[in-house]
Image (spheres, rainbow, N blue to C red):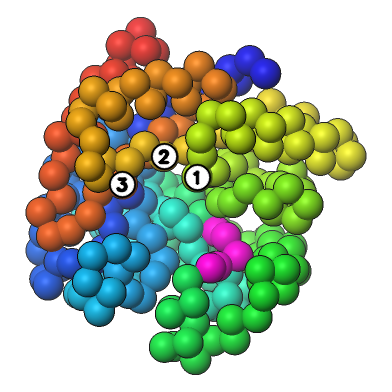
Amino acid sequence: MSPRDFPVRIGVQLQPQHAALYAPIRDAVRRAEDLGVDIAFNWDHFFPLYGDPDGAHFECWTMLGAWAELTTRVEIGALVTCNSYRNPELLADMARTVDHISDGRLILGIGSGWFEKDYTEYGYDFGTAGSRLDDLGESLPRIEKRLQALNPPPTRDIPVLIGGGGEKKTLRHVAAHADIWHYFVDEESYRRKADILERHCADLGRDPSTIEHSAAVDSRGGTVDDALRKADALSAAGISLITVGVGGPDYDLTTLDALCRWRDDHNA
């Protein structure tokens, strides 16, 4: 595999956990945009994923509506929305609305869901990994159909990002529906799964080079230099959208700043 013909972009996932007030998150979005980040993501969970499991946490999509008004340039989205938590037609309408509020800067990130505590505490049927992936496969065409029916329509064809690496179902959903594929990745397994994605594209008659590849670097427990080395490796492997996760309550953007400078040098 060779790198795809996409410019390198940098995202930040501002994880809405462990901040007892919304103000630090608001401040972090503003600072991230000022640093020049391309995309600001949150995530679609109801409880923290690390640290105190019952710590402070805020909801995803109401926050995206606020970010749409707060920002002026950066794209926004969830990394990723859990398909299980909302009726697909409702989710399409929510996405269209945030698309309009943001003047066309929404990315619709979506996945099948996996965090069992969210499901049990909020009364959703957890099912199995397979059933959740089947539900995602049924929801994606419904979302697309509703987006086409809404009045007013979205301001643009909202890019769809699908997260996950399941080889039989998830990657086929990516080939059929996604503009961006996000995989929680090491370079070796990425290369194998990217080859599988290309085979799914061939089966469906899709040009695989039209799908942007995305992955994350982890700012926890590592140095800025570690993140930059990881970004170099991901880019060399063919990944153009690289996102760093930043948790509350402090939202330290040091690594993000370094990655934005790295991106500028890389794209020069």
Residue linked to disc 3: 245
Secondary structure category for the residue under label 2: strand
Residue occupying the point 10% across, 54% down? 250
Label 3 sits on a secondary structure element that is strand
Which residue is rendered at x = 76% and y = 37% of the image?
196
Q: CA distance from mark 3 to mark 2?
A: 7 Å
Name the secondary structure under disc 1.
Answer: loop
| Magenta stretch contains residue 184 | no
Q: Are marks 2 and 1 in contact (CB under 8 Å)?
A: yes
- Asked if marks 3 and 2 touch (Cβ < 8 Å), the reply is yes
| Residue 153 in the image, given as x and y percentages of width and height | 58, 60
Q: Quarter of the image containing the N terminus?
A: top right
- Label ID, residue 225: none
Q: Position of residue 24 (x, y in %)?
A: 11, 59
- Magenta stretch bounds: 110-114
Whether residue 23 can be seen here: yes
Q: Which residue position holds label 2?
A: 216
In this rendered view, identify the residue nearer to me: 245 or 204.
Answer: 245
- Kind of residue at badge 2: Ala
Residue 70 against residue 23 in the figure, above or below: above
**Side of 15 where 248 appears, left or right:** left
* Residue with the mark numbered 1: 184
Q: Nearer the viewer, residue 189 or 67?
A: 189
Q: Earlier in the sequence, mark 2 or mark 1?
A: 1
Q: Disc 3 residue type?
A: Gly
Q: Position of residue 167 (x, y in %)?
A: 73, 48
Residue at the top extreme? 268
> What residue occupies the far bottom of the structure in this picture?
123
The residue positioned 51% from the left and 54% from the top of the image is 109
The main secondary structure of the magenta stretch is loop
The kind of residue tagged 1 is: Phe
